[in-house]
């Protein structure tokens, strides 16, 4: 198993460690509900250094990114980031990712940990005829996510950058926690504000220590992957491997908004046809109307007991105190406010299809 630069620190803090995407990662420290509430109400810090980072550089960088990604990266100016996905050749998704424009001809691609090699191979295949400069820097960089409504206030003493001025999906390269050149990015995965810090592995311990020190007056806590999952699910953010994968199309997954036909990209003709005809199934959000926790793989039924889909993500929402989930159902059964039933062991438990996010911030 791979480790992050902070693995020993998590173990010393008493974290429960689990294998995740080939890494030894902290799943929880004090418990998912406490950690979840910390991020919703104050500030928490996650070690998400298992994520992958690729640098795409040179005069052909944009051409390559435009070819392999669904969103229109030509809209990016330096200091802006963009959520996107990489379609495969058969209608599914290789991965979802964030594209950062760091300089005029330098882009940073942040990809999921479990897909680092797969993504690299996929992009390299298309780069063979394009010729951009590619560097996989995943093993050299750490990533800390400082999330919560008090994140900016708690961390401002660590940087000369005005953290409150960094808008959502924008970033700056500046000083933080005594390190001169780090990426400070407002691209969180929790829905509660904050930012993410990209630094070199040898700088990670210093950043972690200073973050906890600066956040002490705000009751900052280290947060594990279990709470990261409940936080993202309350917002309805897709998790690769659960809600999107090599068999789900962007239009099925509700990601039409990041699929732009202003350019030619991998499988764009087939996806344009799917957009025109409409997908045969859709990713829906539901909340349980009775006691019961939906889990990945559970059947979704109609009133007659016919299977109309499957749950892809589910949990007991710490913020709402009820079961919530995502799943694919046939398009005719995807109307908001309609009732479906989740097969939980021998019980068919009613649930209502709702609009996202589950957790409303205002």
Image (cartoon, rainbow, N blue to C red):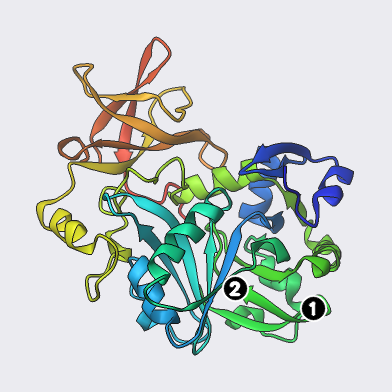
Which residue lies under the disc numbered 2? 185
- From the viewer's perspective, is 258 left or right of 99? left
The image quarter containing residue 335 is top left
Q: Position of residue 302 (x, y in %)?
A: 22, 24
- From the viewer's perspective, is 286 left or right of 272? right
The image quarter containing residue 256 is bottom left
Instruction: Please tell me whether residue 320 is drawn above or below residue 67 in the rendered image.
Output: above
Q: Position of residue 236 (x, y in %)?
A: 43, 49
Instruction: Please tell me whether residue 61 is drawn above or below residue 355 in the rendered image.
Output: below
- Mark 2 and mark 1: Cα distance apart in space: 17 Å
Disc nearer the start of the sequence (2/1) = 1
Res. 211 in view: no
Please give the label number shown on residue 157: 1
**Within-10-Å neighbours for mark 2: few <14, some 14–19, many 20+:** many
Instruction: Please tell me whether residue 314 is drawn above or below residue 140 in the rendered image.
Output: above
**Within-10-Å neighbours for mark 1: few <14, some 14–19, many 20+:** some
Please give the label number shown on residue 339: none
Q: What residue do we see at 49% from left, 90% from top?
A: 104
Residue lying at the far front in this picture: please name it. 128
Q: What residue do we see at 61% from left, 57% from top?
A: 51
- The residue lying toward the viewer, choosing from 353 and 73, is 73
Q: The residue tagged with tag 2: helix, strand or loop?
A: strand
């Amino acid at each position: 198993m791979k480790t992050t630069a902070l693995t020993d620190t998590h173990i010393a803090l008493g974290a429960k460690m689990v294998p995740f995407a080939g890494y030894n990662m902290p799943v929880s420290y004090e418990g998912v509900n406490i950690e979840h509430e910390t991020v919703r109400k104050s500030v928490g810090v996650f070690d998400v250094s298992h994520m992958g980072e690729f640098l795409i550089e040179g005069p052909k960088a944009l051409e390559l990114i435009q070819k392999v990604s669904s969103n229109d990266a030509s809209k990016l100016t330096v200091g802006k980031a963009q959520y996107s996905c990489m379609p495969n050749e058969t209608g599914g998704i290789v991965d979802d990712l964030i594209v950062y424009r760091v300089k005029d001809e330098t882009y940073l691609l942040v990809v999921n940990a479990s897909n680092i090699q797969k993504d690299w191979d996929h992009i390299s295949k298309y780069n063979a005829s394009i010729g951009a400069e590619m560097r996989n820097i995943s093993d050299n960089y750490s990533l800390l996510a400082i999330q919560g409504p008090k994140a900016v206030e708690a961390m401002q003493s660590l940087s000369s950058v005005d953290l409150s001025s960094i808008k959502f999906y924008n970033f700056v390269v500046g000083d933080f926690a005594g390190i001169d050149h780090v990426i400070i990015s407002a691209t969180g995965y929790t829905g509660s504000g904050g930012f993410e810090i990209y630094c070199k592995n040898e700088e990670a311990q210093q950043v972690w220590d200073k973050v906890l020190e600066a956040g002490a007056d705000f009751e900052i806590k280290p947060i594990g992957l279990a709470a990261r999952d409940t936080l993202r699910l309350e917002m309805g953010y897709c998790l690769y491997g659960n809600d999107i994968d090599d068999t789900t199309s962007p239009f099925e997954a509700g990601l039409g908004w990041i699929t732009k036909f202003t350019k030619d990209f991998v499988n764009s003709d087939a996806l344009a046809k799917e957009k025109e005809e409409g997908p045969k199934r859709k990713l829906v959000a539901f909340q349980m109307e009775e006691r019961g926790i939906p889990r990945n793989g559970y059947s979704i039924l109609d009133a007659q007991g016919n299977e109309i889909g499957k749950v892809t993500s589910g949990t007991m929402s710490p913020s709402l105190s009820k079961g919530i989930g995502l799943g694919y159902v046939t398009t005719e059964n995807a109307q908001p406010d309609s009732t479906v039933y989740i097969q939980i062991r021998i019980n068919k438990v009613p649930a209502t299809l709702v609009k996202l996010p589950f957790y409303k911030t205002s």
